[in-house]
Image (cartoon, rainbow, N blue to C red):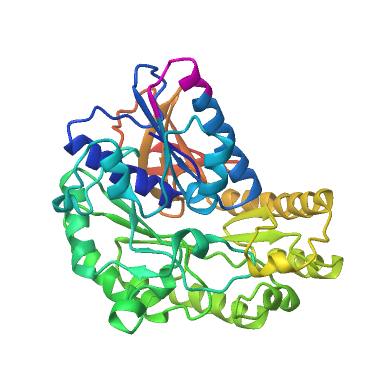
Amino acid sequence: MVTLGCSKNLYDSEVLMGQLKANNFEVAHDSNEDNFDVAIINTCGFIDEAKQESIDTIMNFAQAKENGLIDKLYVTGCLSERYGGDLRKEIPEVDSFFGTRDLPRLLKALKADYKKELLGERLLSTPAHYAYFKISEGCDRPCAFCAIPLMRGKHGSTPIEDLVERAQKLAAQGVKELILIAQDLTYYGLDIYKKRRLADLLRALVQVDGIEWIRLHYAFPAGFPMDALQVMAEEPKICNYLDIPLQHASDQMLKSMRRGITQKKTNELLVKIRETVPGIAIRTTLISGFPGESEEDFQTMLKWVEEQRFERLGVFNYSHEEDTTAYQLNDDVLAEVKQERTDAIMELQSNISLAKNTELIGKQLKVIIDRAEGDYFIGRTEFDSPEVDNEVLIPIEENYLRVGDFAEVRILEADMYDLKAELI
């Protein structure tokens, strides 16, 4: 099983692998071994770079099949959902293409039974102590740049009682940290309960024995459920961390992007978040070079980033995606200009990150140990998500820790994205 793209894809791969294992298949994720008969590629179709990576990966495995190294090649996921017809013509070596909701059909192609009783069970590809935890699928937002609704469909929330049962099963396997993911956490519950229920879900999940950290990813700013902030402030199990993609700061760009919010309202929301949950780490994502983005629009965003001083921030260059609303606009910002603007924001953010990390020197923090690497145990604080955020390095020499342990450390050194610490 090969997974490309985001954590939501990884979750889907884990569900598929769980089904295969229950059907007595030997299954491995991103393995370096070459003794497998079947390869399944779970693709990403979000932006140009991701699509190209998916196509390159398919072509590499198609060549492996031509060379007799594998017998069967299947492709699933977002790229397959969106461009399946074209891919069938261009890459005939692939035995079958499947969309994002074709799990039963994919299993049937493998002569495996879809076991409904395994609902929510997965074969984890992450370290055993944390798991991505999808609470809904699809998205109803009208963002002009985004093709996700084309690939994932309308928003569909998973009922609270089902999610609690899944969390209990994960806790029984040794999972200590749940990383809540969705195309849009903010919308959770509106479709099945007729009101936003993220706060109620959080209150239910903190009751699960064994789960010690709960982290929130991918909240939409417009219509944010403020009662969820109160739960975050009250419940120690919920990390003081929020991933909330804001995309831009220029009102002209926000309107063109169809985000349903202004810079003023965004700023008011950020103030409210920080007031309600003191010390929270906010991660956001921005887009550089959306159609019509002027130098003035960019400078507005750059100044705003400097003012807001986000704890975590990423930027990606705008990708002109077919069938989106923005595709009707002229993609008029040159590629090199997009990259220059991205680089400028990230240079600013790296200085902000260094300053914030330096303030942590001498402070005591709780970390969870993700792995041992070289001379160090690698851990994370509650303010850091796996793969994308800061890491804390603790010397292995004279310290005994296990992966998945929590530990108290004192920060000794800091750079832009990493901290060095001693065990207390």
> Residue 345 appears at what percent x and percent y?
73, 55
Q: Is residue 145 visible?
A: yes
Q: In the image, is 293 to the left or to the right of 277?
A: right
- Observer-nearest residue: 129 or 286? 286
- Observer-nearest residue: 226 or 140? 140
Q: In the image, is 315 to the left or to the right of 2?
A: right
> Residue 64 appears at what percent x and percent y?
49, 20
The span picked out in magenta is 63-72
> Residue 239 appears at what percent x and percent y?
38, 60
> Residue 245 appears at what percent x and percent y?
56, 64
Q: In the image, is 356 to the left or to the right of 173?
A: right
Q: Quadrant of residue 309?
A: bottom right
Q: Is residue 416 visible?
A: no
217 w.r.t. 85: above or below: below
Q: At x 59% / y 44%, what residue is drawn?
A: 50
Inspect the magenta stretch and tell me whether residue 64 lies in it. yes
Q: In the image, is 318 to the left or to the right of 266?
A: right
280 w.r.t. 54: above or below: below
Q: Quadrant of the N terminus?
A: top left
Inspect the magenta stretch and tell me whether residue 321 lies in it. no
- Observer-nearest residue: 72 or 341? 72
Q: At x 82% / y 59%, what residue is drawn?
A: 333
Q: Quadrant of the C terminus?
A: top left
Q: Quadrant of residue 246?
A: bottom right
